[in-house]
Image: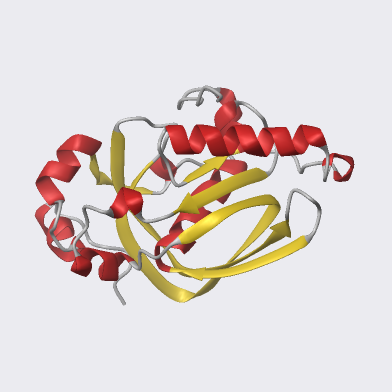
Amino acid sequence: MAMIVQAGDPVLRRVAAPVPTDKLDTPELRALVDEMVATMRAAPGVGLAAPQIGVSWQLIVVEDDGERASSLSDGEHEERGRTALPLTAIVNPELELLGDKRATFFEGCLSVSGWSALVARALEVEVKGLTPAGDPLTLRLSGWPARILQHEIDHLRGILYIDRMLSRSFSQTEAAHELWSGKPMAEVAASLGIDRRDKP
């Protein structure tokens, strides 16, 4: 497993380089993917970008089996669009936001450890890229899986969620959980005096 780079390290603020074509389907790239998956799962997290372990390449891994959301109520699952996202590694991903609909929820980041904030994200996306073996890959996702992909691809552009957050909601993750767990996002936003960006 690798050490996760924390906010303040310049590697998190660089635009990552595309993975060279001669690295596709190589033991070097497979080993990097395996290391990223192990690091993500141990953290634990639902996504990890190569810059988060100090490698400035356009490579992400994502996985959400629902275990980390087991404390959510059925209503919270539905509100978030929290559905399973199988383990996927994407090389040189290209992101397209689909439609105008947005959703605002708390996000955290393994590179901003211990903190979270509300972030407005597109409700639906399409991502095109390559598998580590070099095969074309296209994903069309909505809800929470779409949020995960947007968050991780931001890392490849040198963007952290704190650049997009509704700053009035920035708080320690533990405190946010204690204060807002089980409450609808409209109530959370109203309590913090936030005009949500996902309203029509």
85 left or right of 44? Answer: right
Q: Is residue 32 above or below residue 59?
A: above
Give the residue at the far right of this rendering.
22
54 left or right of 185? Answer: right
Q: Give the quarter of the image for residue 15.
A: top right
Can residue 172 be seen at all in this image of the molecule?
A: no
Can residue 48 be seen at all in this image of the molecule?
A: yes
Q: Is residue 144 above or below residue 69?
A: below
Q: Is residue 116 above or below residue 4?
A: below
Label tally: 0
64 left or right of 107? Answer: right
Colouring rule applied to residues: secondary structure
Q: Residue at x 73, y 54 (%)?
A: 131
Q: Give the quarter of the image for residue 44.
A: top left
Q: Residue at x 59, y 35 (%)?
A: 36
Q: Give the quarter of the image for residue 135.
A: bottom right
Q: Residue at x 61, y 43 (%)?
A: 156
Between 21 and 37, the one lying in front of the other is: 37
Q: Is residue 77 above or below residue 98?
A: above
Q: Quadrant of the C terminus?
A: bottom left
Q: Position of residue 1 (x, y in %)?
A: 55, 25
Between 152 and 154, the one lying in front of the other is: 152
Q: Position of residue 119 (x, y in %)?
A: 35, 53
Q: Position of residue 192 (x, y in %)?
A: 14, 51
48 left or right of 80? Answer: right
Between 102 and 182, the one lying in front of the other is: 182
Q: Position of residue 136 (x, y in %)?
A: 77, 63
